Image (tube, grey):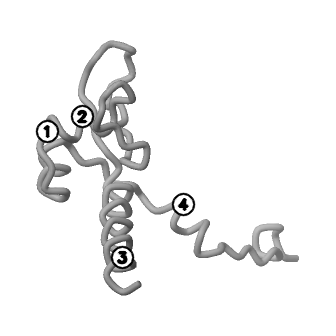
Amino acid sequence: MNSPATTHNIEITPTEISALSPQKIIRLKQVIALTGLSRSTIYDRINHKSKRYDASFPKSIKLDSTLQVGAVGWIESEIQAGIKQRIAERTKLLFN
């Protein structure tokens, strides 16, 4: 007799696989290196009170579990997606 685990075909979609993939958290120095932006510009982009606020710029995440100000990082795939979006916007402007 087959056990329930072997009688069910479970298929995982590519979207589900990417959701299960480990996300890499990167620190500020790596964000600076990837984007070419300065530290102050990055923090201005995520500060809704700043004149240079950019709602599309990836938000940082807290790396500690307390509510106090502490270490933060960014999800690398979100930074990469933001870079790809900027390139696509530029390409669209150049060729339209």
- Give the percent coordinates (x, y) of residue 49: 36, 24
Q: Quick one: 93 or 30, which is closer to the camera? A: 93
Above or below, 41 against 11 in this view is above
Q: Quick one: 90 or 27, which is closer to the camera? A: 90
**Residue type, mark 2 in image:** Tyr
Q: Disc 4 on helix, strand or loop?
A: helix
Q: CA distance from mark 2 to mark 4?
A: 27 Å
The N terminus lies in which quarter of the figure? bottom right
Left or right? Give the position of 78 relative to 2. Answer: left
Above or below, 54 against 82 in this view is above
Q: CA distance from mark 2 to mark 1?
A: 6 Å
**Residue type, mark 3 in image:** Leu
Say whether disc 3 or disc 1 marks the residue closer to the N-terminus.
1
Q: CA distance from mark 4 to mark 1?
A: 29 Å
Q: Residue furthest right?
A: 1
Q: Which residue is mark 1?
A: 39
The C terminus lies in which quarter of the figure? bottom left
Task: Using the image, tell me which numbered label, if any, was put on residue 91.
Answer: none
Q: Disc 1 on helix, strand or loop?
A: helix
**Which quadrant would residue 80 be assigned to in this image?**
bottom left
Say whether disc 2 or disc 4 marks the residue closer to the N-terminus.
4
Task: Using the image, tell me which numbered label, if any, was put on residue 93.
Answer: 3
Q: Nearer the viewer, mark 4 or mark 3?
A: 3
Task: Using the image, tell me which numbered label, if any, was put on residue 19.
Answer: 4
Crowding at label 2, few (<14), some or many (≥20) Cα neighbours within 10 Å? some
